[in-house]
Amino acid sequence: MFLGQQSQNLENAFFLTEDAKLIEKLQLLKKIQENKEELRKVSGISHDAILDKLVNLGIQAETMAAMTAVPLVEVAWADGSVDASERSEILSRIEKHGIGRDSVEYALLERWLEHKPDSKLLAAWIHYMEGLCHELSAGERQQLRDDLLEDVRAIANSSGGLFGLAKTSKAEQEVINKLEAAFS
């Protein structure tokens, strides 16, 4: 009887350990999926393959949120100031990416719109994007590039350009070219 009870205890302990491992794996999978959904909201990226790679690289939604805002801010500041229409367009696009008004990222973005960030911020974004692009396929890189360029061109065009004619200024186009080059 004692041996049978010991055997049953060992079996129960084994299954408890296995159950705990399965629960841990399920929790990890849930956390990965939640991070993927947060990245989807923050970045505006809808392609699962790109999102999976970002998750596998350990990129968090908070990091991506800040990195999403940098190009928009740089284009807005390209001609020396951020006007009301550029500010409005940036805040609108950022909210569409899931960055709420009560978030730290939103507060940081508002600060960047009031006070031009150091040029090191753009350099950091470029290095970040270059590193990320090495991890993405050509198609994924192209999609990420296209999504970003759509956003920054909308910012550049929002201010009306010179006398309402040329929507994108020369300075804005130079910044857009730098951003685009980060994807090569």
Image (spheres, helix red, strand yellow):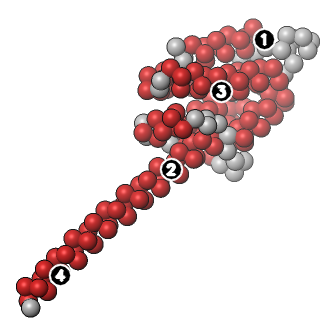
Q: What is the x, y in percent for residue 117?
A: 63, 27
Tell which tag, 4 or 2, sits nearer the viewer: 4
Reply above or below: 90 against 118: below
- State the residue in front, 137 or 172: 137
Element assignment for label 4: helix
Q: What is the x, y in percent for residue 21?
A: 31, 62
Work out whether mark 3 precedes mark 4 in sequence or the reverse, and give the earlier one. Answer: 4
Q: Are marks 1 and 2 in contact (CB under 8 Å)?
A: no
User: What is the C-alpha distance between the residues marked 1 and 4?
Assistant: 77 Å
User: Which residue was labeled with disc 1?
Assistant: 169
Q: Residue at x 81, y 34 (%)?
A: 88
Work out whether mark 3 precedes mark 2 in sequence or the reverse, and give the earlier one. Answer: 2
Reply above or below: 99 against 122: below
Amino acid type at image mark 1:
Ser
User: Which residue was labeled with disc 3?
Assistant: 147
- State the residue in front, 57 or 126: 57
User: What is the C-alpha distance between the residues marked 3 and 4?
Assistant: 59 Å
Reply above or below: 50 against 164: below
